[in-house]
Amino acid sequence: MDLSQNTPENIEYMVNQIVTKIKMVNASAIQYTDMGSEEFEELKEIYEMVLRKNNFSPREMQALAEELGRLRK
C-alpha cells in the first residue's frame, strides 16, 4: 500500500493499524472519518512511530490516544 498519498483510504488504513497495534480498548472513539486530510502528515508520523515499537507502556498508550483525539476534526 502506498501511504504517501493523502487519501481517505490511507487515513482509514493508518487509523485502523494504530488502533489495532496499541490494542485500544475504546477504538470506536477514534474513527478515520473523524480525521481530516489536513492532519494526514501528523497521522502518518504517528503511524510510523507505532509500527516501529513492539510494546507500549500505559502512559504511551494514553498519549497516543490523546494525540489521535487531538487530530479529530
Image (cartoon, rainbow, N blue to C red):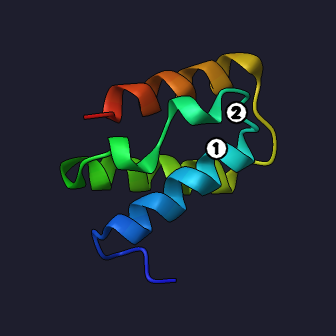
Looking at the rendered structure, the secondary structure element under dot 1 is: helix
Q: Using the rendered view, name the quadrant where residue 9 is placed.
A: bottom left
Residue 51, percent from left and from top: 65, 56
At a point 66% along the width and 27% down the height, the residue shown is 26
At a point 63% along the width and 56% down the height, the residue shown is 17
| Residue that carries the numbered disc 2 in the rendered image | 24
Image check: 70 left or right of 63? Answer: left
Q: Residue furthest bottom?
A: 1
Q: Is residue 23 above or below residue 69?
A: below
Residue 69, percent from left and from top: 42, 26
Residue 8, percent from left and from top: 34, 65
- Amino acid at pointer 2: Met
Q: Badge 2, how many Cα within 10 Å: few under 14, some, many 20+?
A: some
| Residue that carries the numbered disc 1 in the rendered image | 19
At a point 22% along the width and 55% down the height, the residue shown is 37
Looking at the rendered structure, the secondary structure element under dot 2 is: loop
Image check: 70 left or right of 49? Answer: left
Image check: 58 left or right of 49? Answer: right
Q: Using the rendered view, name the quadrant where residue 68 is placed.
A: top left
